[in-house]
Amino acid sequence: MAVATPETTEPRVVLVTGGNRGIGKCIADSFRAQGDRVIITYRSGDAPEGVDAVQCDVSSTKSVEAAYKEIESTWGPVEILVANAGITKDTLLMRMSEDDFTSVLDTNLVGAFRVAKRATKGFLKLKRGRVIFISSVVGVTGAPGQANYAASKAGLTGMARAITRELGARNVTANVVAPGYITTDMTAELPEDVTANYMTSIPAARFGDPEEVANAVQWLASPGAGYVNGTVIRVDGGLGMGL
Ligand code: NDP
């Protein structure tokens, strides 16, 4: 018999990295709207007003540890982790410095590893947990100028599947959401000709909204998705289909 009931009536503790703006903020708002206890991390500037937030740079193990300590002592163990923080440093391969490559990997992939690794302590205590990595369609399709970014995003799929094999029997799921082109600060930086070019290859003929990504994350975190493990959900208007 399928199990689709919440395992507790307590609000779930949800951590969204990079939840101060863009897709992360939208994901955090959607969890908050349904009554979860949501904590976001912010890296630069001040904490956004009116939300529970901790300062955290995912490229620092020390910072991740300090953020988890603060979260756990104030709100308890994290049940749902959305590893969303990410950066780009686009340039063609022949011009890409080793630092351009490793710094993107260190935030997007190793950063996700740092927060997921630290989350497992709480998952084992709670006897349940959900990890949702925010990847990109580019991790599947590749894109010129994004060898660093594509490698980092492809790596998240392998990591989710390794976590699934390690912790699946402990009531932990690990999945990936791979957005296509979504209207945020990140895509606002794209040159006009690049945007126009992308538009011609998106079957939906439009960029997506952050809410459309949040919907997929919501579902993966829901009781009904308890048997969905190690999968990739693309939210890309069909851009990466068939790959
Ligand atoms: P934004 O550039 O708007 O926001 C990125 C977020 O990540 C910010 O909150 C930023 O914090 C945070 N961040 C960056 N580096 C670090 C770090 N070292 N430690 C902690 N936080 C950090 O990006 P989007 O909202 O567009 O993207 C969110 C995620 O979705 C990213 O992983 C991105 O790769 C992915 N994505 C986005 C797509 C799009 O079309 N927009 C498409 C596919 C995937 P701060 O405010 O301090 O800079």
Image (cartoon, rainbow, N blue to C red):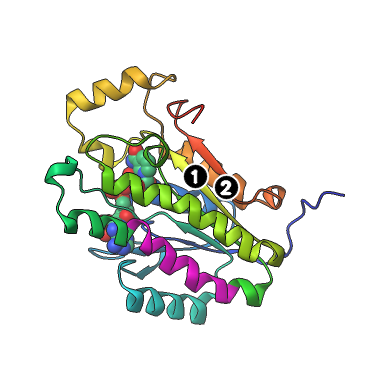
Q: Is mark 1 on a helix, strand or loop?
A: strand
Q: Specify whether tag 2 is near ligand 1 (CB below 8 Å).
A: no
Q: Which amino acid does label 2 sit on?
A: Gln
Residue receiving disc 1: 177
Out of 122 and 149, give the one closest to the viewer. 149
Q: How far apart are labels 1 and 2 at the CA level?
A: 11 Å
Question: Residue at image x 24%, y 59%?
Answer: 103
Question: Residue at image x 33%, y 69%?
Answer: 56
Please, is residue 234 above or below residue 151 in the view? above
Please, is residue 222 above or below residue 102 in the view? above
Out of 162 and 42, give the one closest to the viewer. 162
Question: Residue at image x 49%, y 44%?
Answer: 177
Q: What residue type is labelled 1?
A: Val
Packing grade of label 1 (10 A; few <14, some 14-19, many >=20) is many
Where residue 110 appears, as percent x and y from the top left, is 37, 63
Whether the magenta-drawn stretch holds residue 168 is answered as: no
Where residue 133 appears, as percent x and y from the top left, is 47, 53
**Pair 1/2: label in front:** 1
Where residue 102 appears, as percent x and y from the top left, is 25, 59
Please, is residue 21 above or below residue 102 in the view? above
Residue receiving disc 2: 218
Which mark is drawn over residue 140? none
Q: What's the magenta region?
A: 108-122
Residue farthest to the front, as pictured: 94
The answer to whether residue 224 is visible is yes
